[in-house]
Image (cartoon, rainbow, N blue to C red):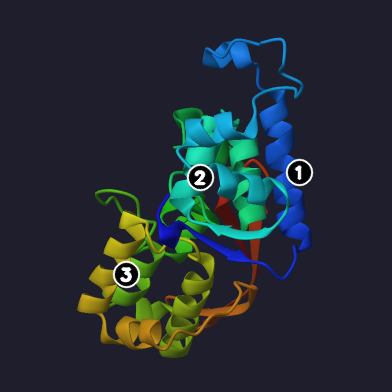
Amino acid sequence: MTQQDVHVDGGGADADAVELGAFLRAARERLRPADFGVAPGRRRRTPGLRREEVAALCAVSPTWYTWIEQGRDVAASPATLRALAEGLRLSVAERAHLFRLAGRADPDPVPMAQADAQRLQMLVDAVAAPAYVLDRHWNALAWNPAAAGLFAQWLGRAQPGLPNLLRYVFLDARAPELIKDWELRAERLVAEYRADSVGLHHDAGHLALVAELCRASPVFERAWRANRVVAREGGGRVFRGPGGESLVFEQFTLKLALRPDVKLIVLAA
């Protein structure tokens, strides 16, 4: 653990810090010393592993680990949280809970299995309105025929890799023809993505995507450097139909309980 990994505020603990400490303590106490090659010993009074043993497993400072279990306001880097998750052998759900309590985005979320992709496709196919699922980089993982019909140049054609919403909006010359008030919508989209990508400043995929879009799109670069942040709240969306008519939708963005790294977007007419 380096000096950049941790910041400690001695002014007292907040509710999240207290809950994070309690969560890590419970995870530590559930571990069996024998599973880690540690002899139980007659003088072992605490259940599970000792704090210093967990600190050694996770390659972090014993003092720092004690502070975080005590509920002190300790800010840990994603790399340090990853080490804790692996050292404590947390499940997928427990790891996601750890990162949420710490207010960080997991740099290495569990890869989507083929079964997950099929289930996501079942989900969007069950929706009559245009619907699609985005990952943390705003790549489309699944979409239904209604979405492919509306976004013909984005989702309605074969292309290498996963179709990315930001690449479509900023790099496809036909996007402004479809999206009414394109520049205003595009600038807001950047502010929404910045809010959505908090915690990804060490993520190679995120950094590469932002660099690519900054090089290729002056509108994206200007909006990104403006550092605006807005929530992806949904609301009215207007597109141009084939005959120039306005197609009006209400957008809803939903998070999946078992896949917090992806979101379902539905455009209700």
Give whichever of discs 1 and 3 has the lower sequence position: 1
The percent coordinates of residue 266 (x first, y second) are 61, 60
Could you tell me how far apart the alpha carbons at marks 3 and 2 are, in whole angstroms?
34 Å
Q: Which residue is denoted by mark 2 in the rendering?
A: 61
Q: Is residue 183 visible?
A: yes
| Above or below, 105 relative to 52 | below
Q: Which residue is at a point 76% across and 43% down the rendered structure image?
A: 22
Q: Which residue is at a point 75% across and 62% down the rendered structure image?
A: 13
Q: Name which quarter of the figure residue 202 lies in.
A: bottom left
User: Is residue 158 shown left or right of residue 27?
Assistant: left
Question: Nearest the camera: 244 or 58?
Answer: 58
Could you tell me how far apart the alpha carbons at marks 1 and 3 are, in whole angstroms?
37 Å
Disc 3 secondary structure class = helix
Give whichever of discs 3 and 2 has the lower sequence position: 2
| Above or below, 238 relative to 117 | below
Q: Give the label on residue 22, or none.
A: 1
The percent coordinates of residue 205 (x first, y second) are 32, 56
Instruction: Determine contact: label 3, label 2, CB under 8 Å.
Output: no
Q: Name which quarter of the figure residue 253 lies in.
A: bottom right
Disc 2 secondary structure class = loop
Q: Which residue is at a point 43% across and 64% down the rendered structure image?
A: 151
Q: Name which quarter of the figure residue 120 lies in.
A: top right
Q: Give the label on residue 210, or none.
A: 3
Nearest-to-viewer mark from 1 and 3:
1
Say what amino acid the circle numbered 3 marks. Answer: Val
Say what amino acid the circle numbered 2 marks. Answer: Ser
The residue sitting at the front extreme is 43
Question: Nearest the camera: 102 or 160?
Answer: 102
Q: Is residue 128 visible?
A: no
Say what amino acid the circle numbered 1 marks. Answer: Ala
